[in-house]
Amino acid sequence: MRESFKIKVLTENIVHIKNVVCGRCIATVEGILSKLNIPYKNVSLGEATLLKDLSTEEYTAFKLELEKVGFALIEAKNKRIVNHIKSILIDEVSNSTDQKKLSEILSAELHYEYSHITNLFTAEEGQSIQSYFNKLKIEKAKELLEYDELSIAEIAYQLGFSTAAYLSTSFKKQTGITPSEYKKMQIKDRKGLDHV
């Protein structure tokens, strides 16, 4: 008589997490998963790949631990897509050296037509992708101005503005002051990119 063996297959479960936008955020989520003894494959910007489905208790504990540090689980499909868009845009502002078109980057990454992506984002966020991206770039410009290592022209180039004048115009439109005036301020008014 032949013995039958059951092989347990580990299934991957991707959970989407709001505000996971940097290396420290990823390390924090990894720490939470380890603390809760939840096996995972990896954590990346905006998501974690778990090696099992969570029980109700595990889900609740994970959700509460994430909320303690300013993160949140995203459950609706459209919200997950918007969160993914934001993660891509934040990564572009923070790390990009190429000057590809935003529409090409998002379409390639998300595998949707850009018109669908932008309509979904606008419906969920009440602003266009380009408007949100410009806000991110201005916040990044504030950070670079505070470091005081680059000229305004170099910051403009790094952030994909065509000229320093265009950066200055966009900066003033969003903040009410010029980059030079911001640089001179004693108390800086900066937001984290995950809070834009």
Image (cartoon, rainbow, N blue to C red):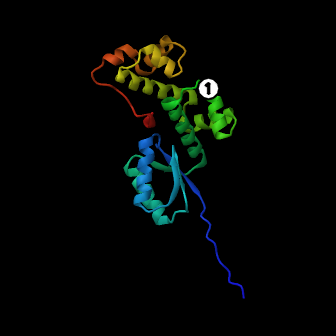
Rendered-image quadrant of the N terminus: bottom right
**In the rendered picture of this protein, how many numbered marks are placed on residues?**
1
**Residue furthest to the bottom:** 1
Expressed as whole percent of the image width and height from the top left, the position of residue 95 reads: 50, 31
Give SS at disc 1.
Answer: loop
Give the answer, above or below, for where 149 lies relative to 85. above
Residue designated by label 1 = 100
Residue plotted at (35% across, 24% down):
147
Residue 169 drawn above or below residue 127: above
Foreground: 29 or 132?
A: 29
Residue that protrudes farthest toward the right in the picture? 1
- Residue 170 visible in this rendered orientation of the protein: no
The quarter of the picture where the C terminus appears is top left
Q: Residue furthest front?
A: 2
The picture quadrant where one finds residue 185 is: top left
Task: Residue at 46% x, 65% y: name it.
Answer: 57
Q: Is residue 18 visible?
A: yes
| Image-quadrant location for residue 174 | top left
Q: Position of residue 157 (x, y in %)?
A: 51, 18
Amino acid type at circle 1 is Lys
**Residue 106: x, y in percent?**
62, 34
